[in-house]
Image (cartoon, rainbow, N blue to C red):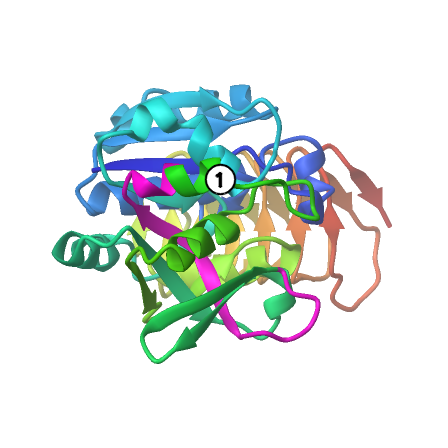
Amino acid sequence: MRALIAAGGTGSRLRPFTNTGAKQLLPVAGQPILFHGLDAIRDAGIRDVGIVVGQTGPEVRAAVGDGGRWGLRVRYLEQAAPLGLAHVVTTARRFVEGEPFLFFLGDNLILEGLTRFVREFERNLPDAQIFLARVSEPERFGVVVMDGERVVRLVEKPPEFVSDLALAGVYLFRDSIMEACDALEPSWRGEYEITEAIQWLVDHGRHVRAELVDGWWKDTGVPEDLLEANRRMLELRDRSIEGEFDDRSDIEGRVVVEAGAKIVASRVVGPAVIGAGALVDRSVVGPAVSVAEGCQVVQSTVRDSILMAGCRVTGVDAIDGSILGRESDIRSAGGTGARRLLIGDHARIEA
């Protein structure tokens, strides 16, 4: 079995963070979203991975490389234009033909991993196996109508309620999906929809299985999703202190302090990650905070937030529920009360 990852979307709902980088590389719990997916693919026993990339391809290639750090063999496949998930599948035709394959959206996170899903496919060998999760905003997703255990109908982002069972961004296919994708016309969105391809399989009597996600799942499409994913994934990190902290500092709970990081006269409350080379000085950080490599937090309080690489926070009474882009610089000369900030790369704010 092979794995195919869609990593070519523009991430328009995650601007300003995706104005300057790939959405699949936005950090959650101390590492890019895409890396969590690669971990899950490796743990499911798959070794050959194709990553379909678009305009952010060079950034994805630089981050992932040849996949060796995961024990994977990674090949990059260029998608000429973002024309939908079924188009991603046909772009990878030569890579996957002749073998069943896992199709994974590179900006999705599934807490339970992929191993159970892959094993169920291997036991049943359907034409397609889809993963479903109940959602409160089905208009944001492709949704599925079931009749007992039978898949009846799939609809992409329905404007009116059809079902609250959303496709959870993980699929397993056999070669018959190519026949289905080849039969498609562009949808009203101008894209080749994977929901319509799976519907083609249903309509032509092919075997389509569905399973419900046992635990938490998130399509990290908007900033609030990133923050929720950060909270959830931080809970999975084991305590690890490789950096330095002085005797005036307290480190409480599930905290990761990476090599080269320094904690000075500060309190860090888990779950939290302090990245390599970061400095936390006379501050309170956590809970639910990811501080990336090279950041500085000085005389400030940060809770429930993501600080991307190289950003600086100085003299801020409290930052809460915030995402700070790479190399951003936030300074305050006074004032009280928590601030919620969503700031892109290289921004500077002085209050």
Horizontal and vertical percent position of residue 274: 46, 47
Question: Considering depth in this image, is 159 or 15 the residue closer to the camera?
Answer: 159
Q: Where is residue 250 in the image (x, y as percent from the top left)?
A: 43, 61
The image shows residue 222 at horizontal and vertical percentages of 64, 55
**Relative horizontal placement of residue 122, taking residue 112 as reference (left or right):** left
> In the structure shown, which secondary structural element does the residue marked by tag 1 occupy?
loop
Q: Which amino acid does label 1 sit on?
A: Ala
Q: Is residue 140 visible?
A: yes
Percent x, y of residue 346 = 73, 32
Q: Which residue lies furthest to the left in this view?
A: 123
Horizontal side of 121 relative to 154 (left or right) equals left
Q: Which residue is drawn at 59% across and 40% down?
A: 185
Q: What is the magenta range?
A: 157-178
In the rendered view, does 29 fall on the left or right side of 310? left
Q: Which residue is drawn at 16% across and 58% down?
A: 124
Q: Mark 1 points at which residue?
A: 183
Residue depicted at 58% across the width and 34% down the height: 22
Of residue 243 and residue 124, the one placed in the foreground of this image is: 124
Picture quarter with the N terminus: top left
In reply to whether residue 133 is colored magenta, the answer given is no
Which of the pair 64/150 is nearer the observer? Answer: 150
Q: Which residue lies furthest to the front in this view?
A: 204
Q: Which residue is drawn at 64% across and 75% down?
A: 161
